[in-house]
Amino acid sequence: MSTPLASLAAGLRRSLFVFVVAAIAAVGSERMFWFWSTGLDEHLFVAAFYAIPTGVTLWAIATHRVSGWWSLWLATPLYALVTEGVITPVVYSGGPFVPVFPAWFAFWHGVLGFGVLVVGIRSLVLARRTGAVAALATAMGVFWGVWSTTLWLPENVEDPELVADQGGPLEVLDPAAFTAYAALFTGVIVIGHLSLGRLWPTDFRPARTTERLWATLLVVGAAGWSVVVPWALPMFVAYAALQRWGLRRHRRTATGPDLFQRLAGPTPWRPLLAVTAMAPAAALTYAVAWELQPSADALRVLMWTTIALQTIAGFVISVVALRRSGRSGTAVATTEPDGQAASDGSSALGAPTR
């Protein structure tokens, strides 16, 4: 029988797990996105807020037996929706019938922040695919360095939200400062994944009362924004219900171990070190752009093209994931102890080869 002290320890361990996942995902959602932050303390403070969408996404993964990539893309839009629809009201900015912001953030927060930085890196590291980890980290670093140049634009430097938050215009980092910045937050990703090796649970399903409490709090949070954005609550409920529908369809046909079971275990440090390729790739890309000094018009084209492509990708991925949600029998690249390939109705997700 579990003692109160054991239950408390288990709860603290689970909370720490959610916080660490949030700290990793927030590097993509914040540090690679729109806000400089050279302080680790500020990032950890932000990660505490990101623990809310992180917990919701992990709950969806565990409750609906998510284990493959396509089923993962049914859960990660919830991460974006809660981030930008409960913590902030940005997702409602395009109006109730235009899915631009939901699709864009489903890609940025969901695919890049949660999908790539958390699940993608962990699956490749556990599979000991060092070359693939290095390639993924380098690609993310180049993207980081390129996208960061859009923060040089006058309208972004003097963004009213940034001015209000920071008490002045955004500081444009020189290459040396950006190198330190990239190294710090790449370190957050590496240390975070190393910690997950000790914290990753094989089961994350909460009690039914906990589920209802979380659902109630999310609805109340979205309802709060309805004071300034009348369509906030119905829009939030509609998008959340759509993803829940897809997740429930997937759960009815899912077989085999879920993501928590597949990605449990200690983190091998050799392939994890390949993640450090992200920092020099980002720094070198940023430094080259600094020397080239592209025009403001060129940076605007880069920014809006990137946003458009991400929006399209987010929409397509979400629609395809929803359409595939009721299928079953698609083999995934995971070898079970009996040597048989697992099946969960999704496409392949890297798994440990121990």
Image: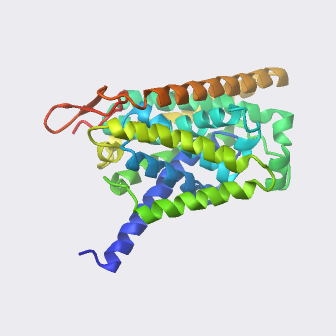
Relative depth, front residue between 233 and 123: 233
Colour mode of the rendering: rainbow
Image quadrant assignment for residue 132: top left
Please indicate, yes or no, whether residue 40 appears anywhere in the rendered image.
no
Q: Is residue 24 above or below residue 126?
A: below
Q: Residue furthest bottom?
A: 4
Picture mark count: 0
Foreground residue, 213 or 189?
213
Residue in front for this viewpoint, 251 or 175: 251
The residue at the point 51 percent across, 29 percent down is 138
The quadrant the N terminus occupies is bottom left
In x, y percent, where is residue 179? 63, 39
Residue 98 drawn at (x, y percent): 72, 32
Location of residue 133 (image quadrant): top left
Q: What residue lies at 44% left-to-right and 40% top-to-bottom? A: 247
Name the side, left or right, on which 80 lies relative to 205. Answer: right
In the depicted structure, whether residue 59 falls above or below residue 16: above
Residue 149 visible in image: yes
Instruction: Point out residue 46 in the picture as x, y percentages from the top left corner.
Output: 63, 56
- Residue 148 coordinates in the image, percent (x, y): 69, 34
Image quadrant where one finds the C terminus: top left
Residue at figure coordinates x 39%, y 64% from the top left? 13
Which residue sits at x=73%, y=28%?
A: 290
